[in-house]
Image (spheres, rainbow, N blue to C red):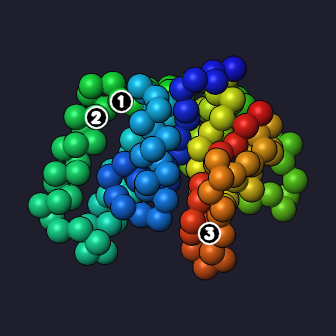
Amino acid sequence: MRAKTPFFDTCYLVRFYLEDAGFEVVRELAGKSCTIAASWHAQAEVVAALHRAAREHRMEQSAYQAVLAQFRQDSEIGLFDWQPLTAGVQQRLQHVFQKAPPTAFLRAADALHLACAAEHAFRDIYSNDRHLLAAAPLFGYGAHQNGAARAQLNGATGRAESGMFFLSK
């Protein structure tokens, strides 16, 4: 298991660039590591999330362009270790969907994050997405609070209001 490099889902990655709830915790955690691992498809999700923030007028167009440039630069210098979506990841994902109970709420993107982390032997995944957290046991992960932070899940948004979670095997 890879214990040293943290694996972030898109919710965490976006907090490098947006000051959404919990961004301080994410940036502090990231500061303890030279590299952040993430699923390859998270690159598209981060760009889409940043675009959404601009579309919703949470940032000016010039800020959006600057943040996109920063994300590209961070990727190019190796801040992120983009984990490939291999045949093994796809097989694990299909197996989980096949065995999951019919009541399981498992989104494709969450399944890709979880299968990718599991297939590439990451012990911990950091997220605050309630749907990903709920689906984590299907992939052998359990949810834990990150440090001493206390999280209050907001039923309307599904986001942790004041704290972040991580998943571990």
Residue marked by disc 3? 158
Is label 2 in a helix, a strand or a loop? helix
What percent of the width, then of the height, locates residue 126? 59, 44
Asked which quadrant contains residue 59, the reply is bottom left
Q: Say whether marks 2 and 1 touch (CB < 8 Å).
A: yes
Picture layout, residue 146 above or below residue 89: below
Determine the residue positioned at 49% across, 51% down. Answer: 25
- Report the side of 30 relative to 135 (left or right): left
Which quarter of the rendering shows the C terminus?
Answer: top right
Name the amino acid, label 3.
Answer: Gly
State whether residue 82 appears in this view: no
What percent of the width, then of the height, locates residue 42? 45, 43
Residue marked by disc 1? 79
Q: Say whether marks 1 and 3 touch (CB < 8 Å).
A: no
Q: Say whether marks 3 and 2 touch (CB < 8 Å).
A: no
Measured Cα–Cα span from mark 3 to mark 2 = 28 Å
Is label 1 in a helix, a strand or a loop? loop
**How dense is the environment of label 3, judged by Cα within 10 Å: few (below 14), some, or many (20 and up)?**
few
**Going by the picture, which residue comes out furthest to the left?**
62
Tag count: 3
Which quarter of the rendering shows the N terminus?
Answer: top right
Q: Judge by depth and name the residue closer to the eye, 90 or 169.
A: 169
Name the amino acid, label 2.
Answer: Asp
* Mark nearer the N terminus (1 vs 3): 1
